[in-house]
Image: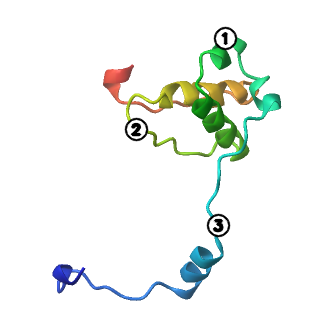
Amino acid sequence: MESLKPTVTIGPLPYFIQRIVKNSQPRRPPAVDSSILSRIDPELVGSLFQFQKEGICFGVSREGRVLIADDMGLGKTIQALGIAHYYRNDWPLLIVAPSSMK
């Protein structure tokens, strides 16, 4: 990071950030919860891989507030649809996408 000087000023992290990082523990995705998946269309659930089911359960455990950042081709869209389907009674739903995806 020395090569960034003098353009960038590097200082210590604030104490509250250090405390949060020190006290935080890595989160493991929750185990697949059949009560969550039972509220989602069975045809959709049947087409999911195990890691996608775990992703949906994680998204639901975070009340739908989740950033799905898997690599391309791993099923971010299908996971997002699963989470959206879980919350279908709370719709309307806003989907933001590039115009090329419409």
Residue 92 is at least partly visible in this image: no
- According to the image, label 2 marks what residue? 71
* Colour scheme: rainbow
Total residue callouts: 3
* Amino acid bearing label 2: Asp
Q: Quick check: marks 1 and 3 in contact, CB under 8 Å?
A: no
- Residue type at the position of mark 1: Glu
| Callout 1 secondary element | helix
The reply to whether dot 3 and dot 2 touch (C-beta < 8 Å) is no
Q: CA distance from mark 3 to mark 2?
A: 24 Å
- Mark 2: which secondary structure? loop
Where residue 31 is drawn, which disc sits there?
none
- Tag 3: amino acid: Gln
Specify which label sits upstream in the sequence, 1 or 3. Answer: 3
Quadrant assignment, res 37: top right
Q: Residue at x 71, y 24 (%)?
A: 88
Asked if residue 4 can be seen in this view, the reply is yes
* Of the image marks 1 and 2, the number of the one nearer the N terminus: 1
Q: Earlier in the sequence, mark 3 or mark 2?
A: 3
Q: On the rendered image, what quadrant is the C terminus found in?
A: top left
Q: Which residue is mark 1?
A: 43
Between marks 1 and 2, how big is the CA–CA gap?
A: 24 Å
Location of mark 3 (residue): 25
From the top left corner, tell me how far across and down residue 66 is, in percent.
58, 45
Marks 1 and 3 sit apart, C-alpha to C-alpha, by: 35 Å
